[in-house]
Image (cartoon, grey):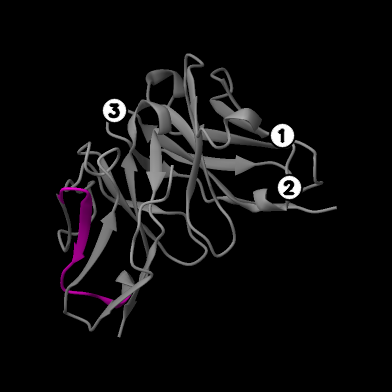
């Protein structure tokens, strides 16, 4: 059974960088698939942030691309998100998920982690 | 890239059917057969219910079905049950520039 777990600080100051890690179990990232990040502001809808392949190939939401970096560490079976210059608008529950790039859907999700941007 | 348009709410009595629409453009929903649907209960992660317009992942009841016509996709839940009360989001592939776009979400209430 594929499982994903997000980890990282729950509070980030404005203008700083948000950093999260997703640890995958039950499946080796090196075996395939893309791996993505999606966020959901409180009471609002879902927004795809970006995705990465085990080779390091990435693709990002154009509206966030200038601030987003996603990386992968296959030795730890983890992938990570960095979002720079955060504001209160970046306050959200952040999910990691497995991305079936060939058909455009996310079939396994982490439980999500709330990140609040506040001084 | 704008979010796909869904009705804010939908409802039905137990045993009835409810259909949720998801309207996009020819650049996303209408251009690809890569529409998916997610169910989200309060405080929980989204769960994949439908992919590639009408395919169900293993374990999803056949009460859930998907379809598409032009720029609008639809999710139908037949034989409504109390546990179907949740938020539902559609998503579509949107090409090699925008990649993924989600819908605005629909809250389904079982009366």
Q: Is residue A28 left or right of residue A90?
A: left
Asked whether the beta carbons under mark 1 and mark 3 sit within 8 Å of each other, the answer is no
How far separated are the C-alphas under marks 2 and 1?
9 Å
Q: Residue at position x 58%, y 56% from top?
A: A41
Residue in the foreground of this view, choosing between B68 and A101: B68
User: How far is mark 2 from mark 3, CA to CA?
Assistant: 33 Å
Q: Chain of mark 3?
A: A
Secondary structure category for the residue under label 3? loop
Specify the farthest residue to the front. Answer: B26
Q: Quadrant of residue A79?
A: top right
Q: Chain of mark 1?
A: A
Near mark 1 (Cα within 10 A), the count class, few <14, some 14-19 or many ≥20, is some
Tell me the element at label 2: loop
Residue A102: mark in rendering: 3
Mark 2 and mark 1, same subunit? yes
Residue A1 at what x, y percent from top left? 38, 40
Q: Nearer the viewer, mark 1 or mark 3?
A: 1
Q: Is residue A104 left or right of residue A116?
A: left
Q: Is residue A46 above or below residue A64?
A: below
Q: Start and end of the magenta stretch? A: B69-82
Residue B11 position, x and y percent, is 29, 78
Earlier-in-chain disc, 1 versus 3: 1
In the image: residue B46, left or right of residue B54: right
The residue tagged 1 is: A84
Taking the spot 50% from the left edge, 34% from the top edge, the residue there is A61
Q: Nearer the viewer, residue B97 or B78?
A: B97
Q: Which residue is mark 2?
A: A87
Mark 1 lies on a secondary structure that is loop
Label whose residue precedes the other's in the sequence (2 or 3): 2
Residue visible at 21% across and 58% down? B74
């Amino acid at each position: 059974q594929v499982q994903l777990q997000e980890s990282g600080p729950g509070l980030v100051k404005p203008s700083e960088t948000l950093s999260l890690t997703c640890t995958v179990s039950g499946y080796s990232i090196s075996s395939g698939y893309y791996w993505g990040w999606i966020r959901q502001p409180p009471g609002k809808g879902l927004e795809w942030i970006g995705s990465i392949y085990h080779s390091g190939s990435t693709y990002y939401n154009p509206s966030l691309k200038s601030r987003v970096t996603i990386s992968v560490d296959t030795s730890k079976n983890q992938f990570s998100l960095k979002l720079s210059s955060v504001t209160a608008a970046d306050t959200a529950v952040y999910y990691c998920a497995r991305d079936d790039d060939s058909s455009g859907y996310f079939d396994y999700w982490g439980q999500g982690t709330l990140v609040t941007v506040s001084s | 890239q704008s979010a796909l348009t869904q009705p804010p709410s939908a409802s039905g009595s137990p045993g009835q059917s409810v259909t949720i629409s998801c309207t996009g453009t020819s650049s996303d929903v209408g251009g690809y057969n890569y529409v998916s649907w997610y169910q989200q209960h309060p405080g929980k992660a989204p769960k994949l219910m439908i992919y590639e317009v009408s395919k169900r992942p293993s374990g999803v009841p056949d009460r859930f079905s998907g379809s598409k016509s032009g720029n609008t996709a639809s999710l139908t839940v037949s034989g409504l049950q109390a546990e179907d009360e949740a938020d539902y989001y559609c998503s579509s592939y949107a090409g090699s520039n925008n990649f993924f776009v989600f819908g605005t979400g629909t809250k389904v209430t079982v009366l």
